[in-house]
Structure formats: C-alpha cells, structure tokens
Amino acid sequence: MQIYQGKPVFEGVAIGKIRIHKQEGQTIAFVKVEDIHKELERFGYARVEALKKLREWYHHSLDKIGKANATIFEAQEIFLSDENYVGDIENLINTLSCNAEYAIGAVQEKYRFLFEQTDDDYMKARISDLKDVSERLLEALRGDALEEETFLEPVIILAEDILPSELMRMEQEMVLALVLTKGSFYSHTAILARTMGIPTLIQVNLNVDADMDEQIAVADSESGVFIIQPDQSVTAQVKQRLQQAKCEESADDQPVGMRICANIGSLKDLESLDGKPVDGIGLMRSEFVFFEREDFPSEDEQFEIYRTVLQAMPEKKVVIRVLDIGADKQCAYLPMEKEENPALGMRGVRVLLENQQILRTQLRALLRASVYGELHILYPMVTGLEEVHSIKEILISLEKELQEQGIVYGHPKQGVMIETPAAVIISDMLAEEVDFFSVGTNDLTQYTLAMDRQSPWLADIYQPRHPAVLRMIRLVVENAHKKGIEVAICGELSADTTLTKEFVQMGVDELSVAPGYVSSVRRKCKECRK
Ligand code: PEP
Ligand code: MG
C-alpha cells in the first residue's frame, strides 16, 4: 500500500482502477518555410478553426457545467483574439521564416515563462488555458479533431495535469476521481471538476509511473490522500463510506419544502439525472435541440424529442423553453444581422415573433407532446404584455388548427422568464397573464447591473448576488403569490447554496439547477428547513 498526500479541490472518495492520462504536447520541430505569406494564411486558418472549436465546446458544455463555467472556453477565445498573442506568433513566422507550429509553441513558452514569474495565482492558473489554446491551433493545423475519450469501466484519472478541454472530452460518468501531481486550485480544470462533482486531488507528491496504470487505488479528497493498492481494511472502509453516501442520497428524495428540478439541454442530459432525487425538469433549453443540427428540426422531430422528455418524467413538471437565440446563442442556419449590441437586440421572443413560422412549428410540436405529461411552456426575454398577448394568440390559433386537423393535443401551462428588469417591474401584470414565472438570473443580473455576463474584464466585479438582483427576486415572488402563481429560479444563482436559505425565506417555489447540483441544493434546502 503506497500513500501520497495531495490538496483537495472537490471533496469525495472513490475507489477504482487508475488510468494514466498523458497530456498531448509533443516537441515541435523548426521548419524553414519558403512562402511566409502561405504560412501566415495557415495560421489564420488555424485560428478561425480553433475559435470555431472553442465555440462548439462552449455550447457543448453549457448544460453540462452551466453557463458561468462554460465561459471557460470563452476566456480561451480571448487569447485567440488578443493582438499581442496573435501578433507575437505572426512576428515569429515573419522574422524566422518558420512553420506556424513552431511559432505557436515558442509563443506558448514565452507566455508560460511570463505567467510563472508572477505572484498572482490566478495568472499562474492561466498557463493551462494557454496550453489548451495552443493545442487547438496545432490540432487545426494537423487537421485532426480529437474524439471523446471513452472508458470500459469507471476509472481514477492520474496525470501530471489535464487541460479543461481534455476533461470535457472524457465520459463524465466514467471519471471517478481526478488525481493530479501538478494542478492549481484556481485553474479552469479545477473549476470544471468542482462543477461536475468529481472528487479531485491536486499537487499529489508522486511521480507518475507507467506501472501505476490499471492498479487499484483510492482517491480520498476528504482526507487529502491518494492510496495505490489499498489494503483490505482501507478498501472496506471506503466501500462502506460510498454505500452510506448512496443511502443518504436515495433517502433524500423526500420533499424539502420546495421543488428541486434540473436544467437540461438535450435528451442525453436525461441520463445524468439517473438516480438523482429530482422533482422535474425546471428548464429545457430547447435551443440545444436546434444547435445539434444542420437545419431546422421538423415538427415531428421536435415532437419526438419533447415527448421523450415528458415520458422520462412521469407525473413530474417539465418546463420546455421555446427557442431562445440571439446574442451569444447563434444558430448557423438562421443567419441574423450583425448588431452593435446583440444582447440588447434580437433575442428570445423578439426573434420568434419576427420569425413566426419557427415559433408555430415548435408550439405545434409542444402542444402535441403535452398529452404525454405535465408540460409547461416557457417564453424567454419577455419585456412587455404585448409579447405575451401575441404568443398566446398564436397558441390559441394553433389549438384550433390541430383540432380541425383531428390531431390530438394537450393543454400545457404557459409561463414567462423573468430575466429583464422590465419584466420584474410589471410582474404583477404579467402574473395575470400566465401560469408561472421562472427567474433567469443570468440575464437578469447582466441587464440589472448593465454588465455583460460574458465579459472576462468584468468577471471580478460582476456580482450575481447583488442586492438589487435579490430584491428583484423578492418582488417577483410577492407579485406572483398575490396572483396565486408560482415562481422558480432557473439561472445559475439557484445553485448557490449560500443563498438557499434566503430563497426559502422569500418563498421561492422551485430551484432548477444543472444536474450536478441537484443533491447539494436539496441537502441545503433540507438543512434550512430544520
Ligand atoms: C438565465 O438567463 O438565467 C437563463 C436561465 O437563461 P439563459 O442562461 O439560457 O440565457
Ligand atoms: Mg436567459
């Protein structure tokens, strides 16, 4: 039995076989190029491809790890748009007449050196982002995209370090724990591990040796130890702890005074809810159904998807939000005019009311699917009563149409997202028009604070717990309850357990969170009721 010490990043315990993860990085040869112009073009192409890849990762991760954390990939995009970083690579190609690969590697080393010299832990933690960005560029130049890494059985990943994108590519359910000999608490990999709920140890004092692969180990980030070849008594203790945790979780599906629901983006996300004590789907971001495709999904295709979600949640509430695109969420096959301020431009219901055929197709699919469960339709980015009136009229006309065609349909509840200050202020009036509210704190925060939710420059002063936002939520709950309708919170703030007590006191009826947070929020909610 060999015992090593490490620092916990996310607490938990796991037992399983070690899988050694080798980081990509290889030595890059210097090649003299004849045609500098062509080499600059190769680099330009790689930059565009890498940006596309990061955008894909961003969308892919949105529902897996939540919006706030998915911005990790947006932060990486900033390197690729940074004049100094890009300029340094182009300069090297120009001055050394070298291949783009070599210039990328050399510039990465230069910045790594600079970041390492600072005393700022945050900057030091950016080294792995920089490496990730270089990898995306090199990958684009090689022309190969790396596939999702799959495992035959659940494993403990052992590595010197791991890039955020490498972790995202791994089958999440198969990763029991992460054990890193380097790593930093502030790295994006650490943030991802915490969000995904993976027990993680960093700075473990061992040298990774190929012989360790496949050996049984215990990663105990509660005690800060990593044990290779644990003896029988350690193995028995760990198994008992795991069993106990499982019992606590399953005994945990008792009502906790408010519904704890999950946010999903696609059918695949339903799998991550298996065995979790969830009271329903509080937000299905239907735009992901659209993003996963090359063109518009037909009414029948959408119907099948929505029906599957409803059937997976018998007798539970399912909230499906109609297509919410615009600003950072773009759909390649629905080109939109470039705007100066896209977050203040064509978004949510504004896009749908301009493109009514898309809305009508989706609503028809939803009306048909609603026969299979407790469907609640949610309308995003509402600012005025007229928008709600228009959509309700469309819904009525579609019900009539379906009836005339002899097609079976149900009677879903309708609600609006409260994610603009305007909607908060008129929430008393909106409450007369709809059956429920869902507070989108991600947008509500950005519009209330006048701070772009994606700006890395504002990240330090961006305060989702700003008293203005909390007061707004309180006002919405009061207005809604006066009119007898319920309020959910489905933005990232709902998973912030430092606020659970306040939400309980406000009388919020439901918190809808990314699947990885369901258990912790439920536990917190129970504690608050004691
Ligand atoms: C929100 O704005 O809080 C929300 C849930 O919607 P999205 O993050 O998809 O904009
Ligand atoms: Mg929103």
Image (cartoon, rainbow, N blue to C red):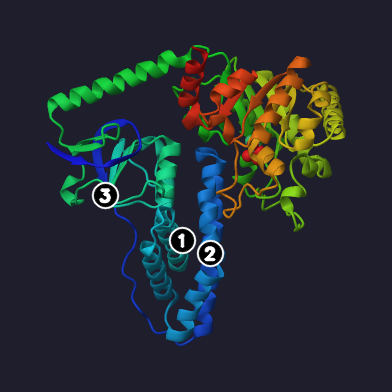
Residue 66 locus on image (x, y percent): 54, 39
Q: Nearer the viewer, residue 462 or 394?
A: 462
Q: Please tell me whether residue 73 is drawn above or below residue 399 in the rendered image.
A: below
Mark found first going from the N terminus, 2 or 1: 2
Distance between mark 3 and mark 1 Cα atoms: 22 Å
Distance between mark 2 and mark 1 Cα atoms: 8 Å
Amino acid carrying label 2: it is: Leu
Disc 3 residue lies near ligand 1 with CB under 8 A: no
Question: Circles 2 and 1: CB distance less than 8 Å?
Answer: yes
Residue to which mark 3 is pinned: 181
Amino acid carrying label 3: it is: Thr
Q: Residues within 10 Å of mark 1 (few under 14, many from 20)?
A: many
Residue to which mark 2 is pinned: 80
Mark found first going from the N terminus, 3 or 2: 2
Distance between mark 3 and mark 2 Cα atoms: 28 Å
Residue 350, quarter of picture: top right
Q: Decide if residue 509 is in sight here.
A: no
